[in-house]
Amino acid sequence: MKQYAIGLDNGGTVTKAALFDLKGHEICVAAQKTQVLSPKPGYNERDMEVLWEANCSCIRQVLEKSGIDPAQVIGLAVCGHGKGLYLWGKNNKPAYAGISSTDNRAWRIVENWRRDGSFLTVYPQICQELMACQQAALLRWMKENEPVAYENIQWVFSVKDYIRFRLTGEAWSEVTDISGSGLMDVKNAVYDRWLLECLGIGEVYEHMAPMKYSSELCGTISREAAQKTGLPAGTPVAGGMFDIDACAIAMAVTTPGQLCTITGTWSINEFISPEPVTGAGIAMNSLYAIPGYYLLEECSATSAGNLEWVIKNCMDTGGKTGNELYTYLSDLAGSVAPEESQVYYLPFLYGSNAHPLAKACFVGMTNYHTKAHMIRAVYEGVAYSHKTHIDRLLSVRQPPKAIRMGGGAVNSPFWVQLFSDVLGFPIETVSGVTELGALGCAMAAAVAAGVYKNYEEAAAHMVCVNAPVMPDMEKHKIYMEKYEKYKSVSGALDTIWNQFAV
């Protein structure tokens, strides 16, 4: 009997389930959007019950659409956006709305920690920048602004740990997520009450679920979840992982020499190392899905999600979707040569890697310019934002032979080529898979089930990497001139963003 694994991917706006065979072939995908609630500027929330039902629905859909016997599923694992906050209450219900990774309500908390020295005190242990969207800052915000909900906390979860908890009834924190939360001593891979007390949230220590690694068994499908999902009760559920780890695993990132970039709502740029790299301008060190490695990450919410917003609010695409839409947009952007457009786009709709209050904008527009200039500026601005992060990573390591790329931008060959030209490196993508995060989860489920002994073996059987897209170095020179102007525009606007404080 043929066997399969399911990967669940909970992004910032869409939940997806994908069914894979054990050779990595993507058999079936189901997706469901969940409404983002924005009660105030900078607030981004989701109803946790609605999110849970969306996960159940997606699992049911892939089972029904594929027509397989659910007993053929050897296991399941979940990934999701990192950071954010999903609280389970002592009353056995969500303690608050789910807070997503694009939320910025706690930005003053982080600023205060920098001013009063708290950040410098905890940095040697947490090995990462503190960010407004992390659990640490959001919990402090909850303590100060939502004391009733704060007192009701039973478990502090990331999104994927919450969904796994609902699937199994067992509370665990998986290390790739919790090590990027600001709540953990990353260097020693433990919780530390002193660290939490330094951040003014010492009582949270009692509500941190015990830790597991991504391919460890974290329970089985409960009877309640079986009724909702269609999976048999007792189906194994692995730890799963932060979605950026899942995408890296699905791109066969298993050695320190590699470097990858992921283009979603977030610009994710990363490599792995046997040791953390601190004090060198690298924003994030967390624990990787492969035990013994750290994930060195440079990130911001400044990537391909900007294109979706611009299409929705600024474009008439004639109802085009999927590949037809990407072809249309690529043709538009390609109709303008890079040296012919001096329109710049700062991709700061959901966050910034410049000033914490920076906003998205087009700069240089006149009545001469068209939709083609706007789309090219978005494509370029997102690539420039990634370059900002990748340059920081390259300051502490040797250049890679190629950069492996995943996320929404890989659906556009034009955009992949533009990334290669901007970065000046060959770009590699993965063949035959639309849902990289879900594939990484399926690989975790396969390792947990004993089909493969580790991720390296799973990658050898389940991942196929395409031939690289090579950079045009003449265009690279043009883009580097434009990149300097992009940085100048961004830097000049830094002087006014404080006036946008809420």
Image: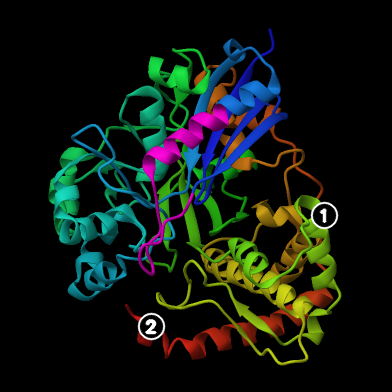
Which portion, as a residue range, is magenta? 35-59
Q: Say which of 340 and 125 sits in front.
A: 340
Q: Residues within 10 Å of mark 2 (few under 14, many from 20)?
A: few
In front of the other: 397 or 450: 450
Among the 4 quarters of the image, the one containing residue 249: top right
Q: Identify residue type, mark 2.
A: Phe
Ranked by sequence position, the earlier of labels 2 and 1 is: 1
What residue appears at the point 27 percent right and 73 percent down from the top-left corner?
A: 111
Q: Can residue 161 be seen? A: no
Circle 2 is placed at which residue position?
500
Q: Residue 89 placed where, x, y %?
A: 22, 38
Question: Position of 270 compared to 203: left or right?
Answer: right
Q: Nearer the viewer, residue 202 or 362?
A: 362
Give the x, y percent position of residue 467: 82, 48
Residue at figure coordinates x 70%, y 69% from the top left? 379
What amino acid type should be assigned to the residue bearing mark 1? Glu
Q: Quadrant of residue 212?
A: top left
Q: Residues within 10 Å of mark 1 (few under 14, many from 20)?
A: few
Q: Is residue 48 magenta?
A: yes
Q: Position of residue 5 (x, y in %)?
A: 60, 23
At a point 57% along the width and 83% down the height, the residue shown is 487
Q: Is residue 159 left or right of residue 413?
A: left
Residue 30 visible in the picture: yes
Residue on which disc 1 sits: 324
Magenta stretch contains residue 112: no
Q: Nearer the viewer, residue 227 or 207?
A: 227
For residue 263, the mark is: none
